Image: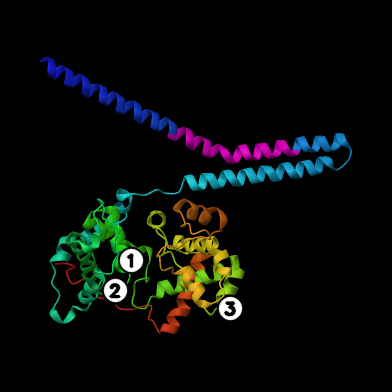
Amino acid sequence: MGHGAMAAAGTANAVRMAEARCRSAIMEAMAEVEKMLRMLPLQARERRVGMRQRCSWERDSAGDNSGEHAMMGGVQREEKGEQQLTMAVTLACLPVGGPLMWANCGNALKKKAEDESGITYPALLAFRRPPQSNTFISEIERDLGRTLPGQRGPRGEEDYFSSEEGRSRLRNVLVAYSTFNPTVGYCQSMNFLAAILILQIDEEEAAFWVLATVVERILPMYYHRSLLGLSIDQAVLKDYLCAEMPAVCKKFEELSCDLSFVSTNCLSWDCVNRIMDILLHDGDAQILLRASAAVVKLMQNKILACKTQEDLLMVLKPKEGTLTLEKGKAIEADQLIKVVFTALPPIPDLPQRRALLDQSFRDKLRFSPHIQLAPCPIAGI
């Protein structure tokens, strides 16, 4: 073996050893964190019992109620410390996504479609609709130019969805979905969801399968022409806001403004990505409702200061495009997520609330629960 080959082999061995050491260190650190998390409740109980015993002894020795006050103060401080620790652990354990995590969310539906119906993304793109059924295509073409104007592309390209590549990828994903699910076809605002997925995942087919997963499994009936799913969750959000922030609800009523104006559409790109991380990880729309409530919580001073309906609409839908707090500072992602998980409680009985509202809205819309779904035209081909 030559000198160069020996040197290369030695370098490769050194790299492998370094990688093994890194893996070992990571595994040890993860095991230690897991052990600490398991021990936290037990340690908290032990500290609280010790505090009570110590304060009880101090009260008996003093012969008055000073020990009782000391015990109550100590326990309250202990409880506050535990709450802060729980909040820290909760925030630390929230999913931080990325292209791979987002892309993986579409794998289950992709496999099901391929295995059960022989549906593939290339086949969806290759399908050509009859000329008389191109309504969705014209709607998609109309919305392409309205999608995230000025937004940089996944590799920093200027105004990505005005470029040929950006428009082509967005068109392909939306047209393919209109073929995949003719019952939904295309619904306004689906272009924004598809664009967000394309920008983050940067792989057209993967973005398509995640879009299909979100529309059909995570946000069912949000993008249906009836907007049934969205209407139900807006009603849930209204009840939740009125319970948590009654003064804000009263202000909306005074100014004859609907709470449906509250949304996460005017948040920064970082906020949108963090919400999507949790939405895709949890597979449920509750994060959208709680994030909307967090927006109201952060902006309630500006909301309560509004005198007219126009003032309120300017606060919720600013011309600048991004929601701002009192001093003109945009809401930051960490700030929003902290409010979601530490300042607001979970929405109670969410499945039951949705079920009750579902029937009520279906009755109003005369919407059959046994609606006949149009089959994908390439299924089984």
The residue nearer to you, when weighing 129 against 305, is 305
Q: Looking at this rendering, what residue extends furthest in the front direction?
A: 327
Residue 149 can be seen, yes or no: yes
Q: Is residue 335 magenta?
A: no
Label drawn at residue 254:
3
**Real-space CA distance between mark 1 and mark 2, rounded to the nearest whole angstrom:** 9 Å
Q: Work out which quarter of the rendered image holds the C terminus and state it.
A: bottom left
Give the image location of residue 378, x and y in percent.
17, 69
Predominant SS along the magenta part: helix
Nearest to the eye among marks 3 and 2: give it. Answer: 3
Q: Secondary structure at mark 1?
A: helix
Q: Secondary structure at mark 3?
A: helix
Q: Is residue 34 magenta?
A: yes
Give the image location of residue 349, x and y in percent.
54, 65
* N-terminal label among 3 and 1: 1
Name which residue lies at 48% across and 66% down.
351
Give the image location of residue 4, x and y in percent.
13, 18
Name which residue lies at 21% across and 79% down.
135
Residue type (three-letter) at the residue carrying disc 1 = Val
Q: Are marks 3 and 1 in contact (CB under 8 Å)?
A: no
Q: Are marks 1 and 2 in contact (CB under 8 Å)?
A: yes
**Real-space CA distance between mark 3 and mark 2, rounded to the nearest whole angstrom:** 37 Å
Q: Which residues are magenta?
A: 30-52
Q: Secondary structure at mark 2?
A: loop
* Residue with the mark numbered 2: 184
Residue type (three-letter) at the residue carrying disc 3 = Glu
* Residue with the mark numbered 1: 215
Q: Looking at this rendering, what residue extends furthest in the left direction?
A: 2
* N-terminal label among 1 and 2: 2
